[in-house]
Image (cartoon, rainbow, N blue to C red):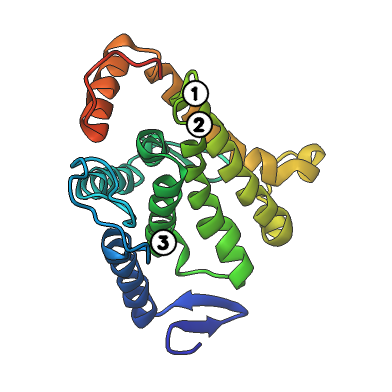
Amino acid sequence: MSTFLSVEDGYFALTSKGTIAIVVLIALLVIATALIKKQTGTSDTGAHENETPRGSAFSIKQLVFSGVALALAFALSYVKLIPMPWGGSVTACSMLLVTLIGYWYGPKIGITAAFAYSLLQFVQDGSTYILSPLQACLDYFFAFTALGVSGFFRGKKSSLRTGYFVAILLRGLFHTIGGYLYWMEYMPETFPKSLAAIYPICYNYSFIGLEAVITLVILSVPAVVKGIGRITALAREENYEILTV
């Protein structure tokens, strides 16, 4: 453990070797999803460029679009639009970019990509202060991977809005569970004492909820809907149509 984690004052911190290990894990995840074949013995000859060849995890186009979406989401997660008074910040719609992958390609690819995003978020924010492995899982690996459940709503009415809303609620749930288990003693003095019992709920859903409101308002703009429709058509290689997102 000491190779990848340092221990100080009862908490863990990722060492430089640990950070490298996470980066290597992300790279291996990308390589594995692109190359691993199921042992089906079937040929991929004649498969559509955008379709996932039988036995493979991702097609090249899916890998490219997912990678670009994750890179943009990670960059936007650094753009803190509104710092919240009790902690946490509203980002520039970073969660939307992750949920788009599930909207494009379904739950298998959506969850895989979201897990890669959780590793990036862990390196970005969580690796310097880890209370326990379970805390890291709840705050990072489970919470951000939950954004991939948007894929289960692919093809349904208002699938992007619905998938996004359910995904961020689930992300907040994992954060809230971690809050009750690990962060209650860190409640700020400015937080109302009468609401102490629901501090993790207020803390997490304040910034997640406000970002959701901003995102859903943006998704109601016709030009945005049209743009997402065009990008979705390219990602899926379908004929373009204005989609009900």
- Judged left or right of residue 165, residue 121 is left
Residue at 38% x, 57% y is 116
Compute the Cα span from label 2 to label 3. Answer: 24 Å
Badge 2: few (under 14), some or many (20 or more) residues near its Cα, within 10 Å?
many
Res. 144 mark = none
Residue 122 seen in render:
yes
* Residue 145 image offset from top left, x and y in percent: 49, 51
Q: Which mark is residue 156?
A: 1
Could you tell me which residue is drawn at 40 percent across and 15 percent down? 244
Residue depicted at 54% across the width and 46% down the height: 87
Number of marks in picture:
3
Amino acid marked by disc 3:
Leu
Mark 1 Cα-neighbour bin, 10 Å: few <14, some 14–19, many ≥20: few
Q: Relative to 14, does residue 159 appear above or below in the rendering?
A: above
Q: Are the residues tagged 3 and 1 within 8 Å (C-beta)?
A: no
State which quadrant residue 179 falls in: bottom right
Q: Position of residue 198 (x, y in %)?
A: 75, 42
Q: Amino acid at mark 1?
A: Lys
Q: Give the alpha-carbon distance from disc 1 to disc 2, as whole Å.
A: 6 Å
Q: Mark 2: which amino acid?
A: Phe
Among the two numbered marks 3 and 1 on one chain, the one whose residue lies closer to the N terminus: 3
Nearer to the camera, 12 or 228: 228
Q: Is residue 18 above or below residue 150?
A: below
Residue under pointer 3: 119
Q: Nearer the viewer, mark 3 or mark 1?
A: 1
Front residue (pair 198, 26): 26
Dot 1 falls on a residue whose secondary structure is loop
Q: Kindly state the secondary structure of the residue where label 3 is placed.
A: helix
Q: Position of residue 151 (x, y in %)?
A: 46, 38
| Gap in angstroms between the C-alphas marked 3 and 1 | 29 Å
